[in-house]
Image (cartoon, helix red, strand yellow):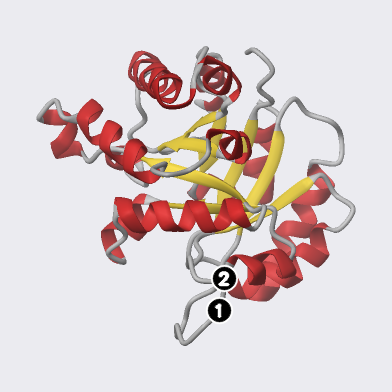
């Protein structure tokens, strides 16, 4: 893995009260106190960010948000800006997650706006792409990913993308218990790396971290992490329990 530090990220989605989130984060900070090969990040819900940041203070667990809006401020009821996330203690923000696309009308164009806004504010975007089961069955995986990446990164200076993390999350594997085979994951990750090379050149393509997301668990993470173009994992349900997530971190 040439100069790419692995990353294990946990997306807590719409789970946990503030108290539960703080308790889980506190325990996770304890569990991950000893060094590991991978960088660790968790993304709680908006209302949990600041107290979780306090619980993680001094630990090696980074904080991320699950989404953001692209405007700096204004009359956008319910929206959260990059500067708000930074002030709450975030270093990362997940952008374009399939559930945002499915339930909240996220498009490749709005994903692009969010990525640009995050980079301009020095937030590191975790840019999610992935195909549905019907798209895979129709042999559209690569055309779908090509469109998502090219539009998502449109008009962004390649030098800025050094701060970006790409995450491949096959929609058919999220929360279903299904996981891409090693061959499927490597095929897609290699395709994405080649695509980044076409857009921004070989140097960025070699250094860009590409995470796999889709029913990652302690019993399959080691195999996934052994794949040459897989640089980490975006973990959903298995990140909600500190002990379970810790086993994934120390794969």
The residue drawn where x is 36% and y is 30% is 179
Residue 240, above or below 72? above
Q: On the image, numbered disc 2 is attached to which residue?
A: 81
- Local SS, label 2: loop
The residue depicted at 32 percent of the width and 60 percent of the height is: 106
Query: Disc number at residue 216?
Result: none
Identify the secondary structure beneath mark 1.
loop
Location of the C terminus by quadrant is top right
The answer to which image quadrant residue 89 occupies is bottom right
Which mark is nearer the camera, 1 or 2?
Answer: 1
Q: Position of residue 65 (x, y in %)?
A: 58, 60
x, y percent for residue 73 = 55, 79
Pointer 1 with pointer 2, Cβ within 8 A = yes
From this viewpoint, which residue is outermost toward the left? 138
Give coordinates of residue 235: x percent, y percent: 52, 42
| Other residues around mark 1 within 10 Å, as few (<14) / some (14–19) / many (≥20) | few
State how far apart marks 1 and 2 are (Cα). 7 Å
Residue at x 72%, y 35% (from the top left corner)? 39
Asked whether, in this view, residue 23 is left or right of residue 79, the answer is right
The residue beneath circle 1 is 73
């Amino acid at each position: 893995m040439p100069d790419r530090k692995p990353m294990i990220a946990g997306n807590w989605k719409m789970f946990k009260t503030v108290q539960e989130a703080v308790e889980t984060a506190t325990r996770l900070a304890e569990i991950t106190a000893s060094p590991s090969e991978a960088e660790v990040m968790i993304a709680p819900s908006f209302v949990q960010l600041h107290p979780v940041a306090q619980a993680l203070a001094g630990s090696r667990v980074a904080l991320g948000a699950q989404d953001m809006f692209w405007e700096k401020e204004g009359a956008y009821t319910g929206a959260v800006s990059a500067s708000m996330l930074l002030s709450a203690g975030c270093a990362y923000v997940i952008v374009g997650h399939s559930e945002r696309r499915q339930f909240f009308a996220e498009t490749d164009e709005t994903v692009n706006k969010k990525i640009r806004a995050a980079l301009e504010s020095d937030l590191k975007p975790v840019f999610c792409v992935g195909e549905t089961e019907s798209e895979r069955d129709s042999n559209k995986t690569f055309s779908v990913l090509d469109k998502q990446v090219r539009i998502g990164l449109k008009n962004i200076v390649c030098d800025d993308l050094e701060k970006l993390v790409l995450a491949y999350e096959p929609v058919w594997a999220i929360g279903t218990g299904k996981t891409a085979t090693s061959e499927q994951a490597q095929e897609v990750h290699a395709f994405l790396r080649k695509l980044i090379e076409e857009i921004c050149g070989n140097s960025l393509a070699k250094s860009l971290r590409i995470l796999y997301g889709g029913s990652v668990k302690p019993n399959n993470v080691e195999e996934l992490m052994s794949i040459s173009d897989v640089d980490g994992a975006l973990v959903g349900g298995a990140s909600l329990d500190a002990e379970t997530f810790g086993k994934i971190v120390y794969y």
